[in-house]
Amino acid sequence: MKRLKERFKDMNNKLLFFVLLGVLIGIIVYAGTVTAIKATDTGEFCSSCHVMGTVYEAFTQSPHARLDCNDCHAPTDNVVNKMAFKARAGIGHIYMNTIGASQIPDVLHATDDSVDVINQNCISCHQYTIDNVAHDSKGTCIDCHRHVPHGLGIFKTSDWHLKLNIDAAK
């Protein structure tokens, strides 16, 4: 009987050790993930790709400069949507900056998926204004306010403005 108690005690100590080790590993993985997510949301990270240099420079001159890039460019409704969107976008960005580098246009435009996300994020932050100021034009926030997030047109080539819906701005 004594031997059984000692064996049970040894087993409990091992189990406790592995549980505590698992919790410690979980905390480290969680902290690392949260840190990586936050770091990859920043303008400094996004501007590390040479094609984003002037976009980031213009962004620092904008009224939204205190925000992180993904406050506008990634879903903010929940973490799962944000991570899935960031993963898809990240894979695309890695491809374009490596294998597809020759296909990068001189002027970058948001994809249709990105436009939807950006528009929803504009609305979520500026709902009060939307409720209190007439918005007669059709389309997205970007159609009329294209100049706002990236420095009021600073550093943009004339090609950048070509996709702007001029009829909506009249």
Image: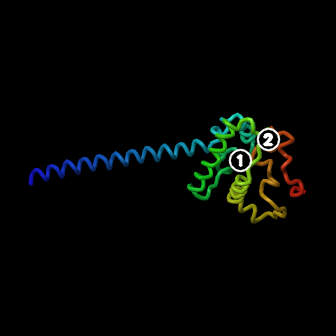
Say which residue label 2 marks.
107
Q: Residue furthest left?
A: 1
Quadrant of the drawing holding the N terminus:
bottom left
Q: Secondary structure at mark 1?
A: loop
Q: How many neighbours does mark 1 have within 10 angstroms: few (below 14), some (14-19), or many (20 or more)?
A: some
Which numbered disc covers residue 64? 1
Report the coloring of the rendering. Answer: rainbow
Image coords of residue 133 (percent x, y): 79, 63
**Do callouts 1 and 2 mark residues in contact (Cβ within 8 Å)?**
no
> Which residue does the image show at 84% across and 49% down from the upper left?
163
Residue type of the residue flagged with mark 1: His
Q: Quadrant of residue 98?
A: top right
Left or right, 36 with respect to 167, comes to: left
> Which residue does the image show at 18% across and 52% down from the upper left?
8
Q: Earlier in the sequence, mark 1 or mark 2?
A: 1
Quadrant of the drawing holding the C terminus:
bottom right
Q: How many marks?
A: 2
> Which residue does the image show at 52% across and 46% down from the upper left?
34
Which of the pair 135/142 is nearer the observer? 142
Q: Image height check: is 145 above or below 138?
A: above
Which numbered disc covers residue 115? none
Q: Residue furthest front?
A: 99
Left or right, 23 with respect to 72, comes to: left
Q: Secondary structure at mark 2?
A: loop
Image coords of residue 85 (percent x, y): 62, 52
Image coords of residue 36 (percent x, y): 54, 43
> Which residue does the image show at 77% across and 43% down from the upper left?
108
Residue type of the residue flagged with mark 2: Val
